[in-house]
Structure formats: structure tokens, C-alpha cells
Amino acid sequence: MLLRFLFILFSIQFAFSQDHLLKGSVYAEGQPLTSASIFFKGTNLGTSTDINGQFSIYFSNIKNPELVVSYLGYKSKTIKISSETTDLGMIILELNNKLEEVVISGTLKPISKSESPVPVEVYGQTFFKANPNASIFEALDNINGVRPQLNCSVCNTGNILINGQEGAYTMILIDGLPIVSGLSTVYGLSGIPQALIERVEIVKGPASTLFGSEAMGGVINLITKLPENTSVFSADSFVSGWGEVNTDLSYKYRLNRMTTGLLGINYFNYSNPIDNNKDGFTDLTLQDRISVFNKITLINKFSIAAHYVYEERWGGEMNWLPIHRGGDTIYGESIYTSRFELFGKYNFNPNLSLQFSFNDHYQNSAYGTTLFNADQTVTFGQIVWIKNFKKNELTLGMAYRFTYYDDDTPATFNNISSHNNASKIHLPGLFVQNQILFNSYHTLLLGLRYDRNSIHGSILTPRLNYKINNSDKSSTLRLSSGSGYRIAQIFTEDHAALTGAREIVFTENLNPEKSWNANLNYVQKFILKEGIIIDLDLGLFKTHFSNKIIPDYDSDPNKIIYSNLNGKSISNGISVNGNLLTQRGIRISLGATYIDTYAEDNGVKTTPYLTERFQCVWKLEKKWKAIDLTLDITGTTTGPLKLPRLGELDPRPGYSDTFSILNFQLTKDWNNNLETYGGIKNILDFTPPANSIARSFDPFDSGVVFDSLGNALPSVNNPYALTFDPTYVYASNQGIRFFFGLRWRFD
């Protein structure tokens, strides 16, 4: 018996030690697939199908061989191979319907991306892993038409622009709820653990009909993971050559059979002052930040999440210490931020749901000798009812938002009473939306929102969206039109008003900004037999603003003057995105946006500051499946941007040069649970000019001569009549640097 067993074992081993010929063919939807991928699992041995969908491959010395057959757009198939197998015959692959992304940002209801009448862009974890960053703010840099813009060279604050429109017009949502707004606009995207984000959805153009104020330019919706769909434990940590350390941890736990929790922790530290441009100031703001996130879900019924972040950051002269905070000897900008968020959703039934959120944002700041302490509390609740009636899907909603805001600036100071009066804004609203499905080719979406602002009164915001597609949905045309509005809070959103030596001037009581937008979007998909998938996305947009608030840096170099525009502001543009995927593990993404933005005030036409004329993004990905290695090359090109100069004598250019940022990364997957990655950021070593901070050697203007009106005068030591000013900024001073990281998960 033993001898028989050994003989059989030897025979099997001998059979697989010989060259073994295996052949077959690969089909899908009745057609042969050219260039379908064929490889043995766990090896680098593979081939591809020919023009007739056929393949043949020799192998030997493979223990328990398994053949993997794959093709883009279709479900992969794994086949166990025995020693007697020589001809696999016809292998049929099925369409992978899971490739169809589900979105919620356009209509408030989960819907496939192709079915949505509202154009929505979706970016998943794979996209962000290609260029890892310490915050979502930085991670959005490689999205076409979306640009993180720095507003201060010292504290590195910034906001997100969509299609060239200022960051205050972009609404940031978490799980569809308005969490990041007002005071938190500048810092609210820091400290969100990226390991807990499932995807990011972006709507370009007004979305005030669904989301109210601040959604004039577009919406960025951060969708967090469902605890039940995550690993038990995961860790992602990286370090950079500049000394940055970022760590994301997540842990899944079960309270009972139906209830699951997800705990996430993010820690970021940068404490290595660097002054490569030799202006005496830190090139990158130093930061120490910890963030804790916890989400609990009761399947299909209830979810609630809490998030807390605390951050200390400072930038300024290299020898600044905390004892100098708020003083006039050594210049520094020091910001302490404490932020708490609570948000959730309760489903009464499949058609009726309650959404709620609460956030408190406290900021204690010192910009040189300018102290800025502010507290903002936002409470939000919304009931949404969605019901299908034959070819109509009706959405009704009631919302209420209360905003409490207090600071120590003119924004809340009452000149009559000489006391500080906190701002309290009540904003109830009603909205209705009807999506009409005429047939499988035509969809019409109509919506209207009514808001009653306790200060500014009634506001109506309508929308119209129309979609037409062909039978296989490879071609889709979308037409969108709608209005938006925004209630401005200058000090909460524009921190350039707080930094430097400029005086802040309000010429009038600021009225709500309003806009009308039209957008034409065309999407075309090609699936080629050669194993290539091509996606093309073309967009045309036009936005007309009224009552727009544009800061005036030019009328007086010592002031920033805020007033409503007495005229119009126009933003026109075109954007194109292209994606190419091949069977050989190559993915190429290219995007470009051209923007023509201008303002007319009393017949005078001007170009807004820090609005790009064009933007290009690109991404190249190459995967070697056999060795589980991935190469990512990402990059952006931006330019030129109009910059705020300090008068006619200022020698600094009025526009930035066109500049590019290029990044390189290699990722190695060791065992499906462990990844290591590393690369180089900003390979071209681009940084802004060293004189971006005017008179960095004299931050308190002790050597500046002023006239009786407070205007700087030319002098021997100051021939250009400059004052200290860090607002002349358009890109980070952080140059080339390497990074290395590790990801590990336990399922």
C-alpha cells in the first residue's frame, strides 16, 4: 500500500516536472477576446490570447497549478489544472457589473454613475494611494479642475478651488452632510484619517438646490467606509525626507451580530524647520496633529460617527519659540485648533430618513501681533423622503441649520454698542426634486429649494438636469443648469485678511452672492478587442455671478478692501479627461482645464487673484502582476496665476510662471496584506521665488517710512515702498523629497 502511494506521488510530481502544454480560447458575449491575460497564480509565467482569442502555454514544476484568466471590464476566472489537462476549450468571461460606481452626491440617493442625470466624478482609494499625502487637502491636487490653493506663505493655510472658483464656493461634505464650512474651511480637511475614506465624489457647478449655501462652485463629498466592509485592523504609515511622519490606524469591532464599529486614529508630525530659500522664514509650517474617528452602524438602519482633531501649527522666523507668540520681537504665526464633529443617519424605512450633524470648531491664533480667537458651532438636521411613482422619483426634504459664530475681529464687533455680538444665523429650508425617467434613454431632473436666512431673508435656488444616452450607455450627454448662493463670512474663510500688515476695510454691509451656471457634459466609452478601454469626458461650463465679493488688494497697498461687486463676474471654461486601460497593466489618465475668468466692476474689467488660466493633470500606472509591483507617475501643471503686488513699485511679477509638480512611486505587494511603497515627490524641485515674502527681514515694518495716511514711502533702505506681506503665494516652498511607507492589514 505504501509503495503504491509513493509511486502515485512520484508519478504526479514527475508529470508536473515535465514541460506541459496547455491551450484554450477566451470568449465574452459570443466574441473572442484579443489580448486577454493568461497567467499561473503565484508565478511570473503567463501569456495572452491572439486575435482569435486562442492561447497556448508551457509550464513545469508548479505545485497545485491554478490558471488565472482576466480581461478588463469582465470578471476574472481561476481554473485549477490537473496533470491530465491539456485543452481547456472555450473559457467564457462574464461582464463585471461591480465596475459600475455608485454615487449619492448628485441626487441624495445611491444611484449608478451612468444613470445619474448629474455628472459626478468618483475617486477611490487606488487613486489616492498613487500619490500619498498627509491630508485630504493635499491629496486632491491630482484631480482635473480641482486645485488646493495656498493663501499664506507662513501658516500654509488654503482652500479648494473648483474650475477656478474661489475655495469659499466649494462645499465640503462628509457622508453627504455639511461638516466643513465657515471657520473650518481652512483647516477642516486636515486630520481626516484617509484610511477610513471609501471614495471622494465631486460635483462641479452649483448644488445649492440640494445642499444650500456655500455650494455655488461645487461639492466635494467624502464617503467614509462602512465598518462591516473593512479589515479587522489596518495601518498605513510613511515618512519623508523632510522629517514628516504620518500614521493612519483603523480597528473594526463588533458590538453584536448587527452592529459594527470602526475606530480610526491619525497622527501627523512635522517638527523640522527648514529654510532652503534663505529668507529667514520656515519653508513649511510645522505641525503636530492627532485625530480620532469612530463610526458605528446598525445594518440598514442607523449610523453615527464622531470625529475629534487637535492641531498645533506654527510658521515664521526660524528662531521663533512659543514664548514669542503674539509678541513683536520675533515674527511667527501660531494656530491652535480644536474641532469636534458628530454626524449620522437614521432610516425610518426605505423611503424616509433623518440626517443630522453637529460640529464645534475653536481656533486660538496669533498672526504676529494680531490675535485671532474664534468659535463656531453648526447644528444641522434634515429629513428626506424619496418615493417612486411609475416613471417619477420624487424627493422631498426639510432642513434646518443653525450657525453660531464669535471672534475678536470687526466681523462680530458692534460699532454702536461698542460690544462684541456673536453672530447667530437660523437657516430653515425646503427642497423638492423630481427625477423623470421617460425611457431608458432620456432622464429629466427638476429641483427647487427655498431657504429663509434670518439675516438676509428668502432665497430661491432652482436646478435642471437632462441626460440622454444610447442603448449600451457607451455615450452619454448631460445638460445642467442651476443657481447658487452664499452668505459670506470674511474672517472665517479668508485668512489672508489676518496675516501681514494690511488693514481690513468693509465699504458696505455685504449681501449674499448669487450665481447662475450652465454645464454641458459628454462621456464616451470605447471597449476594444485588443484589450483596451478608453474613457473620454468632455465638459463645457459657464458661471455668471452677481453680488460677488472680491478682495481688493490694488487700490491701497496697505489695505484689503471688501465690497460687493457692482457688476458681474464671469467664469467660462472647458475641461477634458481621458483614461486608457490596457490588458498589460498600463493605465494612463490625462486631464486638462482651460478657464477664462474675469470681473467687471463699474465698467472696469479685471482678472481675479489666484485663478489659474489652465490646469493639466496626468497619471501613469504600470502593474507587473507576476511580481506584484506597481509604478505610479503623477503630475500637475498650473499657470499662470495673478498675484497681489504691493503697488506699482513692487518688483515682483504680477503673474506666476507656469509650473509643474511631478511625483514618482513604486509599490510592492508582498502577500496581499502587506505593502511597502516609496518614491520621490516634486522631482523637478519646483519652488516659488525666494522673495515671495516681501521684506521678510523686517516683519514688523520697523524700517518702513509711512506718510500721514499710512502709505509706505520709498526710502534708501526701502526703494520699492514695500511692507511685510506673506500673501504673495501660489505654491508650496517644499521642494524635492523622498518618502517611504508601509501598509498592513489583518482581515
Image: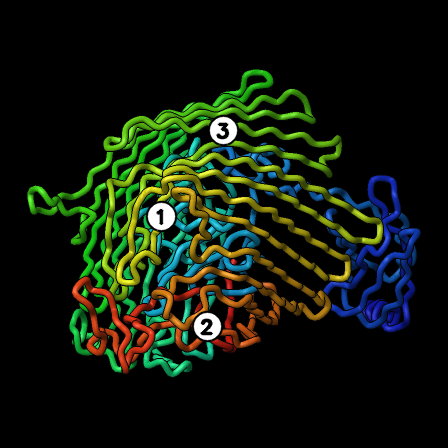
Give the residue at x 55% y 35%: 518
User: Which label number is shown at residue 737?
Assistant: none
Q: In the picture provided, is 612 more to the left or to the right than 495?
A: right
Q: Are marks 1 and 2 in contact (CB under 8 Å)?
A: no
Pointer 2 residue: 688
Mark 3–mark 1 Cα distance, whole angstroms, equals 24 Å
Q: Amino acid at mark 2?
A: Pro
| Residue that carries the numbered disc 3 in the rendered image | 463
Whether the residues at callouts 3 and 2 have beta carbons within 8 Å, the answer is no
Most extreme residue toward the top is 390
Q: Could you give the CA–CA distance between mark 1 and mark 2, rounded to whole angstroms?
A: 29 Å
- Percent position of residue 409, x then y: 18, 53
- Asked if 679 appears above or below 510 in the picture, the reply is below
Query: Where residue 682 sits: x, y (%)?
Result: 53, 73
Could you tell me the amino acid type at mark 3? Arg
Front tag of 3 and 1: 3
Quadrant holding the N terminus: bottom right
**CA distance separating discs 3 and 2:** 41 Å
Q: Nearer the viewer, residue 376 or 638?
A: 638
Q: Answer with mark 3 or mark 2, whichever residue precedes in sequence.
A: 3
Tell which tag, 1 or 2, sits nearer the viewer: 2
Q: Position of residue 168 (x, y in %)?
A: 38, 48
Between 490 and 379, the residue placed more toward the observer is 490
The residue sitting at 33% across, 37% down in the picture is 512
Drawn side of residue 41 relative to residue 7, left or right: left
